[in-house]
Image (cartoon, helix red, strand yellow):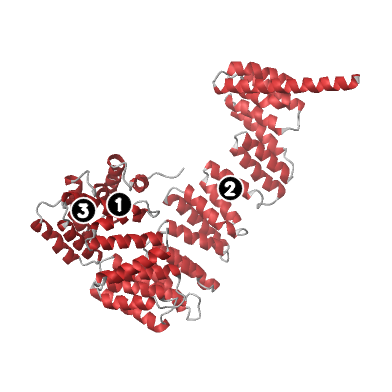
Amino acid sequence: MKRILIVCLFVITGITTAFAQTDELLLARQYSSNGEHQKALEIYQKLFKQDNDAYFNNYIGTLLALKKFDEAESTAKKMIRRHPAAADYVITLGAVYTQHGETEKANALYDDLIKKMPADQNAVAMLAAQFYQGSNANYAIKTFVQGRKLLNNDDLFSYELITLYRFKRDKPALTEEYLNILPKNPLYLSQAENVLSTLYDGDADYDMLRIALLKRIQKDPQQTIFVNLLTWQFLQQKDFDQALNQALALSRRTDNDGSDIYELCRTLVFNEAYDAAIHGYEYLISKGKEGPYYISSKIELINTKNSKVTAGKYVQADLIELEKNYQDLLTEFGQNTTTAFAMQKLANLQTFKLHKLNDAQKVLEDALKVPQIRPALLAACKLDLGDIYLLNNQPWEATLLYSQVEKDFVNTPVGQDAKFRNARFAYYTGDFMWAKGQLDVLKAATTQLIANDALNLSLLIGDNIVADTTGKALKMYARADLQIFAQQQEKAIAILDSINTKFPDNQLSDDISMAKARIAIQQKAYPDAVTYLKKIITDHPSDLWADDAVFMLGDIYENQLNDKEQAKTYYQKIITDYAGSLYINEARKRFRKLRGDTAS
């Protein structure tokens, strides 16, 4: 019984002591966070005497904060004598020397640890981890590098070194390390591309990668992973022709199915490198009808030619040739699920560029009859056919199709697009109040573009109905807007110019300027668009289209007139003068990019 009481007494005493130490530790930490290091030291000194190992780091850290280097040094040395095999105390002593400005003494300690390191993978990893925990990434790297030599294996510790080089932003070392591991670990290619793209700052870094890759390819020409990375490097520098040339050379050498070329062509089209993409698709077609990408490449080749023509200046003959290309494709392969997308493109060309509404209507009506067409493509064709019905004076058929898609895709971006087209249809036909009711619902659409367009059109209707309850001037403007949508620019301008004559007291001045700016952009007359947009900013700086005009000016100067400084000026104007604009985030992102900001 007496023995049990003694044991219980010891347990209770131990628990009480532990609680007391916890309270004191919390108090010491509070003192340290408040900068009261001397008060914290008094507590840590007491705790250290009770348990050297547990409170060593706290005690040393406080001594260093108070610049008591001699005491810190003697304490660390005492722990080294007590634990001669423990490297962490040596590393701490080195940290004391470093903070005291004695880096040579610190490095001598660290070098000695690495020199004495056994040829054991776990021991190497442990020592490197201790260096890293001591905020010494440089010696963690040295440890891993020496460990490779000791173990005679250059493949060891690659992922640890990649982490350390990335932490240190050591771009040359990181690049070499990725090139070392990729041949045996090709699945890491995407990670390497993502990491390098965030770390590289410009052409000099990508040139470094290119030189390193060419050396590797020369040494081992059969290693395809390096060619893939070289293709990616050329893409990052927007050297699209070289990117395609590398990919084509590899495809010919390996005689693969062309999937890499097909994906690359899609990337080239996205970057508007149309000539390179056309070359790539022609290569896939040349592989023969048995190739898995023959049909899709034929379709995409025409689509790319379409994009190339309509993105630049073109003449009627270019459009006629494109139309024939699509028709030849449909003659060769028929109307089916594979070519339905081409049918949609052909109808779009005929509607908005060639203005062959009846032909376009027939193409899309046939597309709707294609069996097993994908639901998303079927919906897109229905919406486009609805637009054609609207332009071809068949309004009720148009709204019927819009309503079908809205019903089939409730609460989805496709359904919201259909709802917006129905509302826009009502606006074009003068049913302004019904249109506004639908647009007010769409202001909360999940798709930002639809929400923005709905907001602008709702405000346009609301502002002008208040000023003119009959809406006669607005009806005339809506007719012009419909002609702009149909890309019948001359008809639209004629209507716009007559609004002020018929309704001299209208409130549509800024709306007319915006409409003419949109027409100028359609015609690629960018200096004229700039004039109209600047007029909006000058005459109507607080009205509906002001922030749209400012952002559009930034976009035109950046992407069409190649005047980055002017673009920056207008993006900054959005940030400073229109903080509530829907364009604020995009303007801020573009401004930072033009200013040369890089991700940290």
- Amino acid type indicated by mark 3: Val
Residue 138 occupies quadrant: top right
Structural distance between the alpha carbons of marks 1 and 3 = 24 Å
Q: Quadrant of the N terminus?
A: top right
Q: Nearer the viewer, residue 166 or 590?
A: 590
In the current view of this chain or complex, which residue is farthest to the bottom? 331
Dot 2 alpha-carbon crowd within 10 angstroms: few under 14, some 14 to 19, many 20 or more: many
Q: Which residue is mark 3?
A: 530
Q: Nearer the viewer, residue 556 or 224?
A: 556
- Amino acid type indicated by mark 1: Leu
Where residue 455 is drawn, which disc sits there? 1
Mark closest to the chain's N terminus, 1 or 3: 1
Q: Is residue 176 left or right of residue 514?
A: right
Mark closest to the chain's N terminus, 3 or 2: 2
Structural distance between the alpha carbons of marks 3 and 2 = 49 Å
Q: Is residue 407 left or right of residue 500?
A: right
SS for callout 1: helix
Report if residue 453 is visible in the image.
Answer: no
Dot 1 alpha-carbon crowd within 10 angstroms: few under 14, some 14 to 19, many 20 or more: some
SS for callout 3: helix
Measured as percent of width and height from the top left, residue 415 is found at: 39, 61
Mark closest to the chain's N terminus, 1 or 2: 2
Measured as percent of width and height from the top left, residue 306 is found at: 33, 70
Residue drawn at x 33%, y 74% as measured from the top left: 346
Q: Which residue is mark 2?
A: 162
Q: Is residue 367 left or right of residue 143?
A: left
Q: Is residue 438 above or below residue 145?
A: below
Q: Nearer the viewer, residue 356 or 40?
A: 356
